[in-house]
Amino acid sequence: MKRHRSPVVLLLLLVLLGMAGAVWAGPKEDVAATTAQWGTIFVDDNPDRILTLYAPEAVLWGTLSPTVRQGPAAIREYFVAAFKVLPGHRVSFGDQLIRVYGDTAINTGYYTFSYVKDGETKTIPARYSFVYVKSDRGWMIVDHHSSAMPPPLR
């Protein structure tokens, strides 16, 4: 006797298998996803959209900034200026070291910014630290430090 599974049973199995992947994702994976989202939004050239990833009390010490920026207005001002001086900007992430301490997480690593100036692609290798705090909106950036990569020691 040949058994046939109903389409409903197969659909239920597929849904449960799909949910299992989401259940297995832990806080490190969530922080990595939020960092990747930052990179995607950064490319959009929209300071208001990237600002949604920062907590209201966040601080940013940006790669191009001689001063630390605190709060939404100052962080927005930084991105408006940065997007203007980096036309066609992109970012690619290298290795990331993510540590989670309860509702706080730190992601340290490096990324490379690229942009086009006078028809030529330029790059800025940089290192970063994102500090996240988990809220009802997910992992929010509360501290972001980025600085150009120094030349190797000789």
Image: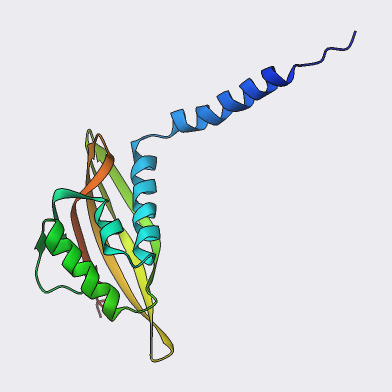
**Which one is nearer the viewer's eye here, 49 or 3?**
49
Q: Name the side, left or right, on which 119 lies relative to 8.
A: left
Quadrant in the picture for the C terminus = bottom left
Across and down, in percent, residue 152 comes to: 28, 76
Quadrant in the picture for the N terminus = top right
**Residue at position x 35%, y 72% in the image:** 113
> Residue extending furthest bottom?
118
Task: Note whether 149 is above or below 21 in the view shown.
Answer: below
Let me know if residue 149 appears in the view.
no
**Quadrant location of residue 90?**
bottom left
Across and down, in percent, residue 150 comes to: 24, 75
Across and down, in percent, residue 46 comes to: 31, 64
Task: Note whether 125 is above or below 47 in the view shown.
Answer: below
**Residue at position x 39%, y 92% in the image:** 118
Task: Note whether 32 is above or below 20 in the view shown.
Answer: below
**Residue at position x 24%, y 45% in the image:** 140
Let me know if residue 127 appears in the view.
yes
